[in-house]
Amino acid sequence: MSEAEDFASLERRGWADEDTAAAYARDFARAAAMAVPHLVSETKAGPGMHVIDLCCGHGIVAGGLIDAGATATGLDFSPAMLRIARSALPLADFVEGDAMATPFEDASFDAATMGFGMPHVPDPPAAMREARRILKPGGRFAYSVWHDTVRSAFTYVFDAIGVHGSPEIALPPGPGATDYADPARAFPAMEEAGFSDLRITEVDSRWVVTKPDAPIDFFIEGTVRGGALLRPQPPANEKAIRSAVAETVKANHGPSAPWDLPMPSVVVSGRAA
Ligand SMILES: C[S@@+](CC[C@H](N)C(=O)[O-])C[C@H]1O[C@@H](n2cnc3c(N)ncnc32)[C@H](O)[C@@H]1O
């Protein structure tokens, strides 16, 4: 990452990387998959409905929508992610584009989903407004986002970076990774975007791992934000971060493998007015 790189270009460049896309789909998404049934049920997706899946990544949510009998269109700005999605789901339609300014007409879709995309767009309220614009009145929009609880693989990693990471390494300013998990922030933003009947559901998503520092690898290899904080760490800092995560995992979840780590998320949803 160059010093001058802003959040939007960090995200775009990062997700375009084939290895990051493949590692996200292989490892990180094991926890993301657990939110899919909730995204599908919160939008009431089913036969006869055409659903847009924003920030579709490797197609995990589109797959759930198709399994529920809906027709799915996925949109993502990463050609690497879209390649994986197209090969996994030949029945869905995938479009390259930006979730804050999609190429679709007003009121094109019966429902909309966004799996773990909200903290990646530079302006999450703009993405909510765009979802509202392309939804038919009455259609539901549901998005998932990681929950920042005191005891999760997410906090194990970011707490360890906070304590042992090099102070020289920082992310460009952008939305907080878990900002829109908090209903105090999410609901007013959704309301302002034109959604009512707001709901939030907690999802007990998890990673089962056989190495206590596996979450570090998941973040280094399969995420943009985590990768940008972890990849440039000097070896001594990376070693200390790994040890801290491994120790926390063993202290909280027992001394031996496998470790069943909480990686909780929430699904926020609303109805287009
Ligand atoms: C964390 S992944 C989520 C993938 C998948 N939806 C899931 O639930 O696992 C975030 C995805 O959002 C995409 N993305 C980030 N910012 C975007 C934007 N502004 N417009 C479209 N896609 C974006 C990335 O390319 C990546 O595929």
Image (spheres, grey):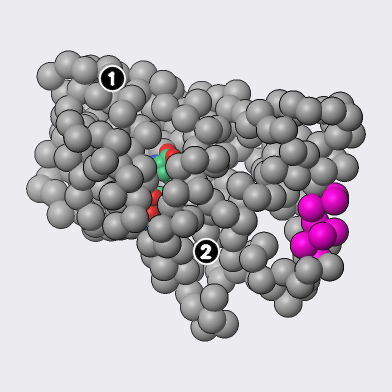
* The residue stretch that appears in magenta: 237-244
The type of residue carrying mark 2 is Gly
Mark 2 = which residue? 174
**Three-letter amino acid code of the residue under disc 1:** Asp
Label 1 beta carbon less than 8 Å to ligand 1: no
Residue 107 marker? none
Q: Is mark 2 within 8 Å of ligand 1?
A: no
Q: Earlier in the sequence, mark 2 or mark 1?
A: 1
Quadrant of the frame with the N terminus = bottom right
Residue under label 1, please give it. Answer: 67
Q: Determine the residue positioned at 53% across, 33% down.
A: 30
Q: Is residue 128 inside the magenta stretch? A: no
Give x and y (percent) for residue 238.
Answer: 77, 62
Q: Quick check: 3 above or below 175?
A: below
Queried whether the magenta region covers residue 238, the answer comes back as yes
Q: Residue at x 35, y 50 (%)?
A: 81
